[in-house]
Image (cartoon, helix red, strand yellow):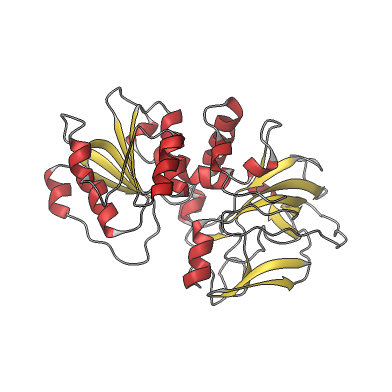
């Protein structure tokens, strides 16, 4: 079968590779169309399907998103893609890309009773060993050997077929089309980030949220915050286009950090000295500084962005004002399910998240 594989920095090829067979507890997917803001490819499979066995299913991916992590990998990798055998998959560079995808089940194993052929699904791409302490505590996204479909081997959505464990498959309701189903993964990142903050438990009338960086994840966080009832959402970005997007996605105030003092602006909106919660989505030092300084005493900064180098933190500010710093890494299954429920119920409009679509 064909697969879009990452061979190294600025080296992505469409290769012919062996079609995967279903194994125990898996589902198999077949690719058709890819969705993304960078490039879009279309593949039509000519391959015959292998039979499934046991708790396995076969899925046909319909849409695959290209995210910022893919761009980073393409320009500067390998980073997430292993150069030595991954402890879970045994695979290394080159690997098949694609971790944001939806599809339809085209074959299931004989012991799979949860899903039926033809059902629309999305896939949670986490790979985990299931035996370490974090996994045993239910925190699969913190597995000691954590990997991802689309980076760590075990194929990826940008291929004619993919086989995944049935536990990674999540059914989509009729109200969610397949192109939107491919956006559940990045929206789950945002949902999980908000769940790491005090806003997950209760939103107060005077709560102010500060989102530093209005890229895809920052915009998704704006949507999640709005859906949870946060009335004042401040977003910042140096890009005019992204600021315009933040405004259309529901931000109350949008700032250009090259033109205004973000911290002063935020503090000026409240008598309590800043935002209740800040979400750092920029991955740069000035953004982190603004996030921490822009929160009120006892406020929380959630670090969502992926950093390529060490950052510095004003520890005295954190100590003196009893501020909280917390990380947010990817998602749990409950985040996927919550996002699907939110889209299905109309809590927020996921259609805004589409950057480009080619059928």
Q: Residue drawn 76% across and 67% down?
A: 2
* 140 or 328: nearer the viewer: 328
Residue 173: % across, % down: 68, 33
Number of numbered labels in the structure image? 0
Q: Residue drawn 76% across and 64% down?
A: 20
Q: Residue drawn 27% across and 41% down?
A: 300
Any part of residue 80 in sight? no
In the image, taking residue 160 as reference, residue 238 lies left or right, namely: left
* 100 or 244: nearer the viewer: 244
In the image, taking residue 301 as reference, residue 84 lies left or right, namely: right
Query: In the rendered view, would you say 225 is above or below 89?
Result: above
Q: Residue furthest right?
A: 48
* 359 or 325: nearer the viewer: 359
* 245 or 281: nearer the viewer: 245
Query: In which quadrant of the rendered image does the N terminus lie?
Result: bottom right
In which quadrant of the rendered view does residue 117 lie? top right
Residue 166: % across, % down: 69, 48
Residue 158: % across, % down: 68, 60
Query: In the rendered view, would you say 247 is above or below 326?
Result: above
Residue 135: % across, % down: 51, 52
In which quadrant of the rendered view does residue 38 lie? bottom right
Q: Residue furthest top?
A: 205
Any part of residue 40 in sight? yes
In the image, taking residue 18 as reference, residue 145 lies left or right, namely: left
């Amino acid at each position: 079968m064909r697969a879009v594989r990452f061979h190294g920095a600025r080296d992505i090829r469409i290769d012919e590779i062996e079609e995967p067979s279903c194994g125990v507890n898996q589902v198999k997917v077949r690719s058709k169309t890819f969705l993304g803001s960078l490039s879009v490819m279309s593949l039509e499979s000519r391959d015959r399907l292998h039979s499934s066995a046991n708790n396995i299913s076969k899925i046909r991916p319909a849409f695959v998103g290209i995210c910022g992590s893919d761009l980073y990998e393409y320009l500067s990798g390998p980073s997430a893609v292993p150069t030595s055998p991954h402890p879970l998959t045994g695979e290394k560079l080159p690997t098949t890309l694609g971790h944001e995808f939806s599809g339809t089940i085209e074959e299931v194993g004989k012991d799979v009773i949860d899903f039926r052929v033809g059902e629309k699904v999305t896939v949670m791409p986490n790979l985990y060993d299931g035996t370490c302490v974090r996994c045993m505590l239910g925190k699969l996204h913190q597995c000691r050997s954590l990997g991802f479909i689309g980076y760590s081997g075990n194929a990826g959505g940008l291929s004619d077929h993919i086989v995944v464990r049935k536990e990674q498959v999540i059914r989509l309701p009729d109200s969610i089309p397949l192109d939107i189903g491919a956006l559940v993964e990045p929206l789950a990142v945002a949902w999980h980030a908000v769940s790491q903050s005090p806003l997950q438990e209760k939103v107060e009338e005077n709560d102010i949220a500060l989102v530093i960086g209005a890229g895809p994840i920052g915009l998704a966080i704006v949507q999640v915050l709005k859906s949870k009832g946060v009335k004042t959402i401040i977003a910042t970005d140096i890009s005019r286009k992204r600021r315009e997007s933040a405004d259309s996605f529901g931000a109350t105030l949008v700032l250009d950090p090259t033109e205004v003092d973000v911290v002063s602006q935020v503090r000026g909106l409240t008598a309590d000295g800043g935002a209740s919660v800040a979400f750092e989505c920029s991955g740069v030092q000035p953004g982190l500084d603004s996030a921490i300084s822009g929160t009120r005493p006892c406020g929380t900064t959630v670090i969502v962005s992926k950093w390529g180098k060490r950052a510095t933190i004003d520890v005295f500010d954190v100590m003196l004002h009893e501020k909280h710093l917390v990380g947010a890494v990817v998602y749990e299954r409950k985040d996927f399910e919550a996002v699907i429920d939110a889209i299905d119920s109309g809590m927020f409009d996921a259609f805004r998240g589409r950057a480009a679509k080619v059928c």
